[in-house]
Image (spheres, grey):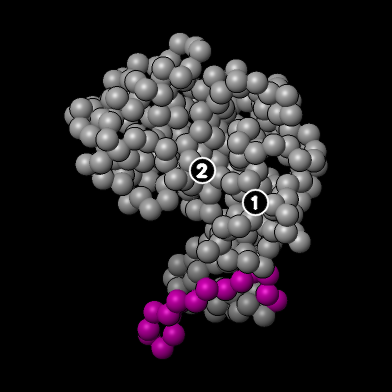
Amino acid sequence: MVIKVEELYYSYGGERNAVDGISFEVEKGEIFGFLGPNGAGKSTTQNVLTGLLPVQKGRVEVAGRDMRRAGHDLYNLIGVSFENPNIYLRLTGLENLQFFASLYDRETADPMSLLRKVGLEEAAHQRVAAYSKGMRQKLVLARSLVNRPEIWFLDEPTAGLDPTTTQWVIDLVREKRDEGTTVFLTTHNMHVADALCDRVAFLNEGRIVAMDTPRNLKLRYGEKLVTVEHRRDGRLEREVLSLSDERERERLAELVRLGRLETIHSEEATLEEVFIKVTGRALQ
């Protein structure tokens, strides 16, 4: 296991713990999604895992290091992309990567090669202040890869991005996973999590309330629906029927018996629908 968390608690001093006794493990080469609405404890947990916050109570190991005693060498092994990026607007894209590369005690990736990978080669010598939001997000991702990390922490990597750039981020994360990088993804975007994650944990009010593969969670908690089209008085009508409801199952059987069905399609629950069912909360 490259990440191991046992009974982690964290409090900012209020009545409720921000992180309330969570335990989980992340395997090498896995994309692990840590999912929940704002305020659920996602960022607090990631900040503990990356050493930005101390371990108040519990045990946390990252890359084989006890986070109560982890030293500077941990940062040679991890890459972190925050939702609020720390890049320098007055520097060019290339100068940003060159600066961050100089902070590491290990061989780093070639900055220009990284800019080429993220599609910013032509903007390498432009000041970041002139970059669009999508370009800045690409630079942030490149910055987090400059030390060739073994574990890549991503905090809301697609927040505010257009669909094309979002898909680009998804493809990049898959590529790094295929190269052997472990990815720890915190997000409230269930579409991105469903597309990427090998396993996910649902976090609600500081506690993990469900954890499994996206498919298994949808099979376990999702409502089984079918969409049918049938003829009635010569007109084509469409109905969505729940196989969990006895009356709607009888309705489907009746349509089959009468020979009225034109089409029938099964529908899978979305990960967001499953989250709402498990937690009783929407993601926003």
The spot of residue 155 in percent (x, y) is: 51, 43
- Report the front residue among 115 and 29: 115
The magenta region covers 230-246
Q: Quadrant of the N terminus?
A: top right
Is residue 264 one of those drawn in magenta? no
Q: CA distance from mark 1 to mark 2?
A: 12 Å
The spot of residue 218 in percent (x, y) is: 63, 55
**141 is higher (above) or lower (below) than 147:** below
Q: Residues within 10 Å of mark 2 (few under 14, many from 20)?
A: many
- Report the front residue among 183 and 224: 183
Is residue 233 one of those drawn in magenta? yes
In this picture, residue 203 sits left or right of residue 174? right
The amino acid sitting under disc 1 is Gly
The spot of residue 198 in percent (x, y) is: 59, 38
Which residue: 61% across, 71% down? 242
Which residue: 23% across, 34% down? 127
User: Could you say which disc has been placed on residue 266 in the image?
Assistant: none
User: Could you say which disc has been placed on residue 41 in the image?
Assistant: 1
Residue, disc 2: 155
